[in-house]
Amino acid sequence: MLKFLAKRWFGSHIILALGFCALAAGLLAVYVNWVFAIIGFVVVASSGYLAFHNQLLIRDEMETYISTLSHRIKKAGDGVVNELPIGIVLYNEDKVIEWHNPYLQHMTEKDSLIGESLLDVFPPLTEIKEDQQKAEITYRKRIYEILHRPEERLLYFTDITDYKELQMHYEEEKLVLAIVHLDNLDEVAKGMDEQSRSLLLTNVTGAITKWAHQYGIYLRRFSSDKFLAVFDQGTLHQLEATRFDILDVVREMTNKNKIPITLSIGVGAGSDTVIELGEMAQSSLDVALGRGGDQAAVKFRDKITFYGGKSNAVEKRNRVRARVISHALRDLMLESDLVLIMGHKMPDMDAIGAAIGVLKAVHAAEKQGYIVLDESNPAIERLMQEVEEHEYLGDYFVSSDQALQMATKRTLLVVVDTHRPSMVIEPRLLNVTHKVVLIDHHRRSQEFISDPVLIYLEPYASSTSELVTELLQYQGDNLALDVLEATALLAGIVVDTKSFAFRTGSRTFEAASFLRRKGADTALVQVLLKEDLHQYIRRAEIVQHTEVFCGSIAIARGKEDETYGQLLIAQAADTLLTMAGIEASFVVCRRPDGLVSISARSLGDFNVQLVMEQMGGGGHLNNAATQLKDVTVSEAVAQLKEILKNYQGGKLK
């Protein structure tokens, strides 16, 4: 018997009781009668004997019970090890199997694995780290959860295939909401008679309805140009596999029109609430439209993926939005005590020209404003020289540190020519100021400035300078532009359109005409854009090291041990695009700041924006770029070629 049980049965209380009885018997012998004393002693002795004897009996019975229970437990343990559907493997230091339970025979369909290499029997285990205690592997078309005990060299295999299939089935049945939008229905239908318009709309609606029936999508129209689509994540995976081919179907079936109809689709998935799915679908559609339309934007939780985007954004000829934005911008300026204007890092002529235009609007509202610029660069060097010599413009340029000191809660920050917080000259200004206005012409990327009070993002525009010029036209009839102010805006348009050769619409010429009437000097534009002879020679050296990839893609690279300015890299890409047989050009060089820059250009049939987004950049369909850290020029070229192969194979998203 265990000691604590013996003490409870034959403890001090029993001995004390028997001792007291013996003392009582002794007192009887002295004071009463010895006969009663003898009887008392006999009773005490008998009780002591019985207590001791019963203790021995209980100890024997307890030991018998415990030994029987141990045998049963051991037998049950053996049954668990041998019969439960869990694989158990013991291996030695050389990863050779020393023992396994019978379930491993069922798993591997082998009689014995003892003496075999663990990694040869289970190749997926090579992907598990030595100290990893939990993992999942796929073995013989089954999924197993691995519980690893490295210190004991012990592995447990649990078959979780049914659970995974149930989980997958649950995920595929989750609700997905999408909004299908006809991008340019009003522009296409303008000028059509009612019969032609109805026929066109019927054909497009029929194609969308047929597509919905094909994939089991519930489709309901809720406005003239919008549909609500309801389906599940399993269907979403099918649509992603086809890369939302309805985009191509609608575009091609209306290709005979002067302007083909395109679709934009915003998809929300991955949330458990219908309200959040609806908000995700709407925000995805906003992103797709902000990128120029003709594409699907799929937002799954926090990740957004794009499909399509093969055509240029259609120029909108309605100036109502420009007038509304202009008046809203003026109201925000009047409510602020200070206006700060900021472009992107390494600003170009478009960024500075647009900033000067916004500064003019600030002065027209009789408010105080400044342009944030830390340092000049070759792209704007001549313009900044003219600004410094100007009567008053040079006084309105401040550094980022000065801007941070000036900024208050009532300061208005206007960001031009970019919408990515990582690209602005001073990201801290975004947090210091509570009101941010965004004016940009680039296609919207996943990274976006949070909570701007006013957004004027129009991918159809040739440049941000064009957008700002339109806004200035509604800032008052008596708005007077200085020659340098008008010329800076015109230079921004000229640079981004490559002298009106690319991305040029009717409104681009209207903006240029307005600037010319306001005194823009075309001769001064040419002076501002003049190129240094040394830079021209260096650009020719870059072009010299060009290879043609996939028949029509030019890839040029700079020397590994030399650095090149961003303007030079962009100019080299533009130069390559003028060569016969070249549809797209990519120039890869190292910049003075140590980053490897890639400038991409195309004639419109090749979407360089998709390629650059895969490398962390962005831009337009025919004008995009990216910057890479901690890579060599050769590594960047190799990465670019791999992405181009996927693009040519139709796999690029």
Image: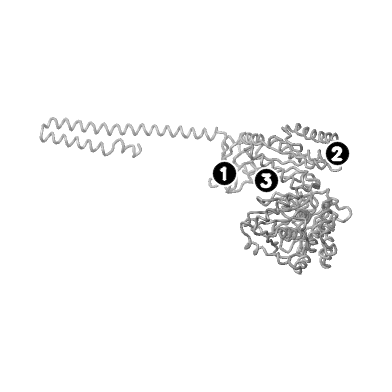
The CA span between labels 3 and 1 is: 33 Å
Marks 3 and 1: which is nearer the front? 3
**Camera-side residue: 407 or 444?**
407
Disc 1 residue type (three-letter): His
Q: Which mark is residue 493?
A: none
Q: Can you say which quadrant of the picture contains the C terminus?
A: top right
User: Splitting the image into 4 quarters, where does residue 37 fall?
Assistant: top left
Residue under pointer 1: 148
Residue type at mark 3 is Lys
- Dots 3, 2 in contact, CB < 8 A: no
Instruction: In this rendered view, identify the residue nearer to me: 568 or 587.
Output: 568
Residue 637 in sight in this render: no
The local crowd at label 2, few if under 14, some if 14 to 19, many if 20 or more residues have their Cα within 10 Å, is few
Tag 2, which secondary structure?
loop
Q: Which mark is residue 303?
A: 3
Can you give x and y, in whole percent of width and height, for residue 307 in the image? Answer: 75, 43
Disc 2: which residue? 192
Q: Amino acid at mark 2?
A: Met
